[in-house]
Image (spheres, helix red, strand yellow):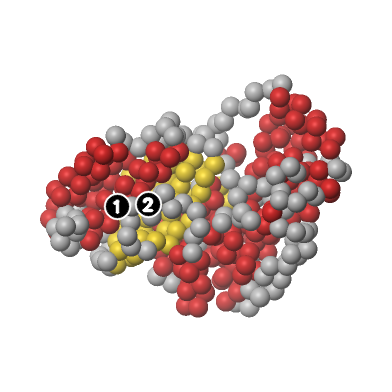
Amino acid sequence: MRTYARTFAAALVSCFALSGFAQAADGPGALTRLLEAQLARMPAKSGIYIKHLPSGEEGMVKADEHFESASTIKLATMVIAFQMADAGKLKLDDRVELTPAVLRGGSGIYRYKDLGLRPTIRDLITEMVITSDNTATDLMIAKVGGKERVNAWLKDAGYQVLNQTHTTGEYFRLIYAAMDPKYASLSMEDVFALCCADTTVRRMPVFSDQRKALIDEVRALSANRSPAPSDPNNESRWFGAASPREMGRLVEGVEKCTVAKLESCDEMRRMLRAQQAGTMKIPHYLTVPVGHKTGETTGVTNDVGVIYAKSGPIVISFYNMNMTGTRADTEDMMGEVARVVVDYFDGVRK
């Protein structure tokens, strides 16, 4: 299947591409037609937005539809934080102590560290981006004024789809509330104990001992009950919402430095270039640099950012949900699509 896919992709690119920009060869819409052919093969509901910044050419499929953002929505918090730093409202060198109340499960590194660690605000933003750290994310959402402030900023900036629906702690608490409504009032320490008491590097009695009765109760409930069916169309249960086009616009603002001062944009671009996850997605088959932010949850795998092609930066915003195949196959195909896009603008490799 993958050999066929690569042959098919190469054939399409050969039809569309010259040694430079392909639009001149086939007229407006060539890139979109190419993307439509590619995404028709994806084992998921897939949407993509592409913009070649030097030429302004765009291509897109389902670019304005709503997708579960997963962790890509964290980029909004990153931009707000740097805007606040530019305005003197947030000091990137200030330190924040990691206490039991701020730890979050899921992706990231801080859940494995000793309590009392005091990373800087800059450290938190960095980890929120490059390891998608959920502890850092909720700390930063709070630092910029809460999810309500994030959503107000998005609305003021003209975004109609982008939305931070939950903090990571709230999102994980939904899992337990689906088992029993009484768990909707769990504290963040309770939620972390339930998800992670046995998976931290070092045993933490504040979670494993003090909440043993709660942990045993929920485990017993889980053993006797099938997981609640997911509802991919219920946006109230998403971590966040995004459309490929709107997220592409946010990424473009960072790359073109229209959202913050130059020094702050440089820092954000460096963070995106330092990404530690998603090597099998957009960058999979590429030999040019990529700055990007990934996002995953059940049935969802996303990647957004900038490909630094030879012909100039290419904004790419790629969303996949309701996957019917394996995550590995979907992400492999994301890499194939990214390679086709680069070949389209840079010319097919000889």
Could you say whether the residue bearing mark 1 is in a helix, strand or loop? helix
Check residue 237 in the rendering and tell me which mark sits there, or answer none.
Answer: none
Q: Amino acid at mark 2?
A: His
Q: Position of residue 24 (x, y in %)?
A: 14, 59
**Between 250 and 12, the one nearer to me in the picture:** 12
Instruction: Count residues near mark 1 (Cα–Cα under 10 Å), then give few for <14, some for 14-19, many for 20+.
Output: many
Q: Which residue is mark 2?
A: 284
Q: Amino acid at mark 1?
A: Arg
84 vs 307, left or right, is: right
Q: Are marks 1 and 2 in contact (CB under 8 Å)?
A: yes
Looking at the rendering, which quadrant does residue 148 occupy?
bottom right
Residue 8 x %, y %: 21, 41
In the rendered image, the residue lying farthest to the front is 202
- As drawn, 296 above or below 116: above
Label 2 element class: loop
Along the line of sight, which residue is nearer the eye, 30 or 157?
Answer: 30
Instruction: State whether residue 146 appears in this view.
Output: no
Name the N-terminal-most of marks 1 and 2: 2
C-alpha gap between disc 1 and disc 2: 8 Å
Quadrant of the rendered image containing residue 129: bottom right
Residue 320 position within the rendered picture, expressed as x and y whole percent measured from the top left: 43, 41
How dense is the environment of label 2, judged by Cα within 10 Å: few (below 14), some, or many (20 and up)?
A: some
Q: Quadrant of the N terminus?
A: top left
Taking 174 as reference, is 258 above or below it? below
Query: Do we see residue 172 in this rendering?
Result: yes
Which one is closest to the eye, mark 1 or mark 2?
2
Rendered residue at 60%/39% (across/down):
237
Name which residue lies at 75% across and 30% down: 219
- Residue 84 vs 210, above or below: the answer is below
Name the residue tied to disc 1: 339
